[in-house]
């Protein structure tokens, strides 16, 4: 029954989206058909399909293959619900749900669009929806029925049985898929042909929204990896992580280039190019993740036919959009050339660096695939490559980022600008020196990281004070400007976070008997006891550590080792004590004779990675809400 | 400068910037690629001293010897075997008879692993190993 409802809803949604796409033909007619109804219906049908799958998971309906393969009656309710998108078919359904949701948002709430433009945009959005629904129906249908009905399911991968699964994929998808609407906006604009400031104003909030959620989704994923995988790192340069970082870099470039288009009516073709590139990379990301072409922690069971299908979808959208751009490029008039010492000059600089970083990550990610195809050698590109290139590219980017918001549009005076930066330079050097004094161990590059973070932080604050006349004019402050300030401060805090976490981390791996202790910086961890635990669908051990700082008791930490009998799979639940400026991290391994093996970390500044990312998210949302909902 | 010439310079500068980036990428990339071998392959190759590679195969049954945080085990591709020594914590999915990938270098015919990777699909078999062992 559920399968029938699901299939019919998907087919109805596919037909409706194809119908809406065909409406493009009628765009020249006097009366343009309002797309609101078909868009709402698409949303309704996909939502129905999604909820019927969720229902099948909640009641453990094992007559549906997808539920049988990924669920189990003993699984907690939360993971029955989130398990819907913890597998390929379900996650593609979530993808399409977000796709139609964006269409719905535009048709309902974006009142700034005129009818023909809205119809065209939503028709292109419907084309994307149609193609992805076709992909689901033909190769990834979550509603395939099996008979006889199995007694119980195979269970969900225990690594995914974590609240992280509830938040990470949906947020990431809002970001990924949000870029599709920017793509549709751009393609539709070719009908009118005027890519001017008003167009930049139309797409800007949607770029902001996708960018914000992409930021949130990526940082939630890295936080999840940090506490669940038990190795204490937050970023591994895994191909799937790269797949989410590439559209983010592109969206970051786009975010800034639309500003130039809006204020100076320049960088038109470049902005169109970035809008296409961003969506292309969210498709390429989907391809890399879903095809299983590269080995990765995320590449759970894969199927090559799906890979070919997604590759065809990628090729279709990427080639058609770039051919369109190449053909029409001549008719798009660029008016102004850009002076290097100006705000737009600084933004061009940012854009070039973002795209350069994108290129390095892209090459590092796909190089192994090409090499294997051409030579048969299997290789992998190690984190040192990515760390080195990313650091080299980010240093100049952050140096300029600090003062770019203070530069005037059109033309500015370099020496005047530099003299205004004296205070900022002094404060950043002071902070770096203090760090050097307190914490002089660690490589020199760590001081560079701290200097950059301080430079960006004080530069942004300084500009904020100048702009608000030392907080006297706080009320007149533009919310988008406030959003930018919060986001840039977030980046500064984030940079300090990665510097501390990667360069000052102290790691100890030790076997301990009960009663023994380990010393970590100023902390002492006493291994107090170990006990057996039993959860709804796992068994395991829990250790208890009492954390002391200079003989003062602080907290009891309880790392766990779990074993999931259904999948014969063990997981590590790290215990983390976070003080806001540093983390104490314990991961439990296995028994060795009569003691246990543990991994301990003292990671300074690590929480700042997520604090900074959340600030960037909030900043983006502030600007978005201001642009979207301000009264004219 | 005429606008046309200015535009030419801009395009030229952008283009050379990206050429420079790609060139730099490829140079850095050369130093950071890790080849992936099975025990039979690694024995045939003449690896340079301290050349970092990845080795993959199955963990041989009853081959794990623990000594505090030191661990020794044997990786097999069902034809040849290779002894591996490692210090540290093994990933959750490490188990006898199942697929594993280690990263490190060969020293006196023992593979000194600096990392043991827990990259598995849900059938506990890294795709690289599956390709090499069963094709």
Image (cartoon, rainbow, N blue to C red):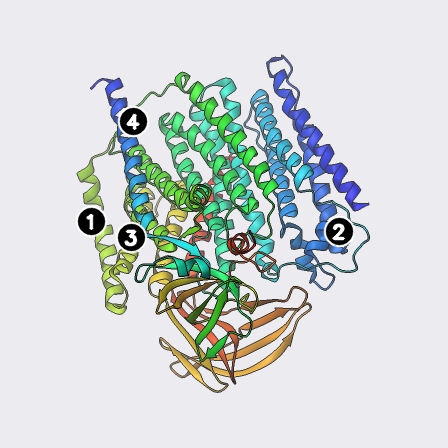
Q: Residues within 10 Å of mark 3 (few under 14, many from 20)?
A: many
- Helix, strand or loop status at disc 4: helix
| Residues flagged by tags 3 and 2 on a common chain | yes
Residue lying at the far bottom in this picture: please name it: A515
Residue linked to disc 1:
A422
Residue linked to disc 2:
A56
Q: Distance between the residues labelled 1 and 4?
A: 35 Å
Q: How crowded is mark 1: few (under 14 residues within 10 Å), some or many (20 or more)?
A: few
Of callouts 1 and 3, the N-terminal one: 1
Where residue A420 appears, x then y in whole percent?
Answer: 21, 44
Residue linked to disc 4:
B11
Kindly check if marks 4 and 3 are in contact, taking CB atoms under 8 A apart as contact: no
Kindly check if marks 2 and 1 are in contact, taking CB atoms under 8 A apart as contact: no
Of callouts 3 and 2, the N-terminal one: 2
**Nearest the camera: A208 or A149?**
A149
**Nearest the camera: A63 or A453?**
A63
Q: Is A581 placed left or right of B23 in the picture?
A: right
**Nearest the camera: A157 or A472?**
A157
Q: How crowded is mark 2: few (under 14 residues within 10 Å), some or many (20 or more)?
A: many
Residue linked to disc 3:
A452
Q: How far apart are marks 3 and 2 (CA)?
A: 51 Å
Nearer the observer: mark 2 or 1; the answer is 2
Residue A236 appears in the picture as rendered: no
Q: Is B106 placed left or right of A322 in the picture?
A: left
Q: Which chain does the numbered disc 1 sit on? A: A
Kindly check if marks 4 and 2 are in contact, taking CB atoms under 8 A apart as contact: no
- Helix, strand or loop status at disc 1: helix
């Amino acid at each position: 029954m559920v399968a029938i409802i699901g299939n019919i809803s998907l087919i109805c949604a596919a037909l409706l989206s194809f119908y809406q796409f065909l409406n493009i033909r009628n765009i020249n007619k006097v009366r343009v058909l309002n797309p609101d109804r078909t868009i709402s219906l698409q949303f309704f049908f996909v939502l129905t399909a999604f909820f019927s799958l969720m229902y099948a998971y909640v009641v453990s309906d094992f007559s549906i293959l997808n539920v049988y393969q990924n669920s189990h009656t003993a699984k907690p309710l939360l993971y029955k619900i989130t398990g819907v998108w913890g597998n390929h078919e379900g996650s593609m359904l979530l993808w399409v749900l977000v796709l139609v949701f964006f269409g719905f948002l535009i048709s309902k709430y974006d009142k700034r669009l005129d009818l023909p433009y809205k119809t065209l945009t939503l028709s292109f959005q419907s084309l994307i929806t149609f193609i992805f629904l076709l992909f689901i129906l033909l190769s990834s249908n979550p509603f395939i029925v099996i008979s006889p009905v199995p007694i119980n399911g195979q269970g969900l991968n225990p690594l995914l049985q974590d609240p992280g699964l509830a938040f990470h994929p949906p947020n990431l998808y809002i970001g990924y898929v949000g870029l599709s609407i920017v793509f549709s906006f751009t393609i539709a604009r070719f009908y009118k042909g005027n890519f001017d400031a008003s167009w930049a104003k139309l797409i800007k909030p949607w770029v902001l929204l996708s960018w914000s959620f992409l930021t949130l989704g990526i940082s939630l994923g890295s936080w999840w990896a940090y506490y669940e995988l038990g190795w204490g790192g937050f970023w591994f340069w895994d191909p799937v992580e790269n797949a989410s970082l590439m559209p983010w870099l592109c969206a970051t470039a786009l975010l800034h280039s639309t500003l130039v288009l809006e204020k100076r009516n320049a960088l038109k073709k470049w902005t169109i190019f970035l809008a296409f590139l961003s969506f292309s990379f969210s498709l390429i990301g989907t391809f890399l993740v879903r095809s299983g072409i590269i080995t990765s922690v995320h590449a759970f069971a894969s199927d090559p036919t799906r890979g070919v299908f997604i590759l065809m979808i990628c090729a279709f959208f990427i080639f058609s959009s770039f051919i369109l751009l190449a053909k029409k490029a001549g008719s798009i008039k660029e008016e102004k050339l850009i002076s290097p010492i100006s705000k737009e000059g600084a933004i061009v600089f940012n854009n070039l660096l973002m795209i350069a970083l994108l290129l390095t990550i892209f090459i590092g990610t796909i190089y192994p695939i090409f090499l294997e195809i051409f030579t048969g050698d299997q290789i992998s590109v190690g984190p040192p490559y990515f760390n080195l290139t990313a650091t080299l590219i980010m240093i100049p980017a952050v140096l300029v980022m600090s003062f770019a918001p203070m530069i005037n549009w059109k033309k500015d005076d370099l020496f005047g600008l530099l003299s205004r930066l004296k205070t900022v330079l002094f404060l950043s050097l002071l902070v770096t020196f203090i760090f050097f004094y307190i914490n002089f161990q660690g490589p020199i590059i760590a001081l560079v990281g701290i200097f950059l973070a301080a430079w960006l932080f004080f530069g942004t604050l300084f500009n904020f004070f100048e702009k608000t006349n030392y907080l006297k004019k706080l009320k007149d402050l533009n919310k988008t400007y406030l959003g930018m300030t919060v986001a840039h401060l977030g980046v500064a805090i984030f940079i300090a976070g990665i510097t501390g976490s990667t360069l000052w981390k102290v790691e100890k791996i030790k076997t301990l008997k009960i009663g023994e202790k380990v010393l970590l910086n100023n902390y002492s961890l006493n291994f107090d006891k170990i006990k057996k635990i039993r959860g709804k669908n796992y068994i395991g051990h829990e250790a208890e550590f009492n954390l002391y700082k200079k003989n003062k008791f602080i907290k009891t930490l309880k790392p766990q080792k779990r074993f999931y009998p259904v999948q014969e799979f063990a997981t590590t639940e790290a215990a983390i004590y976070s003080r806001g400026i540093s983390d104490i991290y314990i991961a439990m391994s296995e028994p060795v004779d009569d003691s246990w093996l543990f991994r301990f970390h003292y990671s300074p500044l690590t929480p700042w990675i997520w604090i900074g990312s959340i600030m960037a998210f909030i900043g983006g949302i502030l600007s978005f809400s201001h642009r979207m909902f301000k009264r004219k | 400068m005429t606008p046309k010439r200015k535009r030419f310079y801009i395009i030229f500068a952008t283009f050379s910037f990206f050429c420079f980036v790609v060139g730099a990428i490829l140079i850095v990339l050369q130093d950071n690629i890790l080849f992936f071998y099975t025990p039979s392959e690694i024995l045939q190759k003449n690896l340079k001293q301290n050349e970092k590679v990845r080795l993959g195969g199955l963990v041989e049954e009853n081959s794990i010897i623990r000594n505090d945080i030191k661990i020794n085990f044997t990786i097999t591709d069902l034809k040849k075997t290779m002894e591996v020594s490692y210090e540290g914590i093994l990933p959750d999915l490490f188990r006898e008879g199942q697929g594993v990938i280690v990263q490190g270098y060969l020293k006196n015919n023992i593979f000194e692993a600096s990392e043991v990777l827990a990259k598995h699909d849900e059938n506990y078999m890294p795709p690289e190993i599956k390709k090499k062992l069963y094709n």
